[in-house]
Image: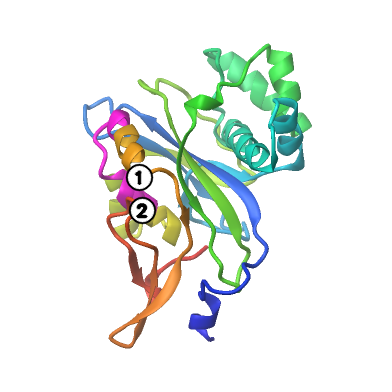
Amino acid sequence: MDVKAIFDTGGEAPPATPAATLVIFRNDPAGGPPQLLMVERSASMTFAGGAAVFPGGRVDEADRTFALALGASDDDARDELAARIAAVRETLEETGLAVGIRQRATLDEARRARALLLEGGELAPVLTEMAWELDLEMLVPFARWRPKHREVRVFDTRFYLADLGTGAVELLVDSTENTHLFWASAQGALDLADSGKIKVIFPTRRNLERLAQFHSFDDALAHVAVFPSQMITPFMELRDGEPWLMIPGETGYPVLGEKLETAARG
């Protein structure tokens, strides 16, 4: 395998599937660092099977249609709105949480909305039925990852941050794609990965390391003001003859890479 060719960032980028991920914060009841919601994907999934990731998934055509209906003025605005819509939709589907909604949903309302979403597959009709309005400003752009490798499926994933505050909510696992939902601090999730209790792929590990810097959601917002969302494209470089998978510096990430042989890429 020519790993240098696989991770070469030059030339034309391979096709990528648009996707969106939501990093959901809640206050730690014990007063520690904020906790983040993670989902463990079914081992049967083609991408990141068995890995612990943040809620999210691919952007659907219905998300793009909805973005246009909301007044997206051009392709860039449509893609950004569609990604935020997808993040809200996928989170509701995978976890039962109604995030990015102006109204404060009760547990029964969230359950009903999720059932409607699972039945119809589109967010817009669910919002109409529930008399809900989107509040997409609640989703704070954090990063955008788009690998250029050619060995596996490539996703162009936009990461967003959102805050639940107290986080006094119940969760509903989507057993078709995920097997377990759990809350953990960013460092706690890294500790679980290092002990072998969960598996994390390369982008998740780098993002957890970045998120572990924050002692509150306000800390995260202050950080994003200094390091706004940027496109992250991993690349390979040789260090003492060994291939390392790396990301660019000056992007807010405290750890820029690891040996290729240890980097779980999904």
The numbered mark at residue 251 is 2
Residue 220 placement (x, y as % from top left): 32, 36
Please give the name of the residue rendered at 34% of the width and 69% of the height, measured from the top-left corner.
258
Could you give the CA–CA distance between mark 1 and mark 2, rounded to whole angstroms?
6 Å
For label 1, the crowd category at 10 Å Cα-Cα, with few meaning under 14, some 14 to 19 and many 20 or more, is some
Residue 63 placement (x, y as % from top left): 71, 36
Q: Is residue 264 above or below residue 161?
A: below
Magenta-tinted stretch: 207-219
Helix, strand or loop for the magenta stretch, by majority: helix
Residue 260 relative to residue 90: left or right:
left
Q: Is residue 25 above or below residue 196?
A: above
Q: Quadrant of residue 246?
A: bottom left
Q: Quadrant of residue 27?
A: top left
Tell me which colouring the rendered structure shows. rainbow
Q: Amino acid at mark 1?
A: Phe
View extreme (left): residue: 31
Q: Earlier in the sequence, mark 1 or mark 2?
A: 1
Relative depth, front residue between 18 and 184? 18
Q: Quadrant of residue 117?
A: top right
Relative depth, front residue between 260 and 53? 260
Q: Is residue 148 visible?
A: yes
Q: Which residue is tagged 1? A: 227
Residue 10 placement (x, y as % from top left): 54, 74
Residue 49 placement (x, y as % from top left): 55, 58
Q: Amino acid at mark 2?
A: Thr
Relative depth, front residue between 230 and 65? 230
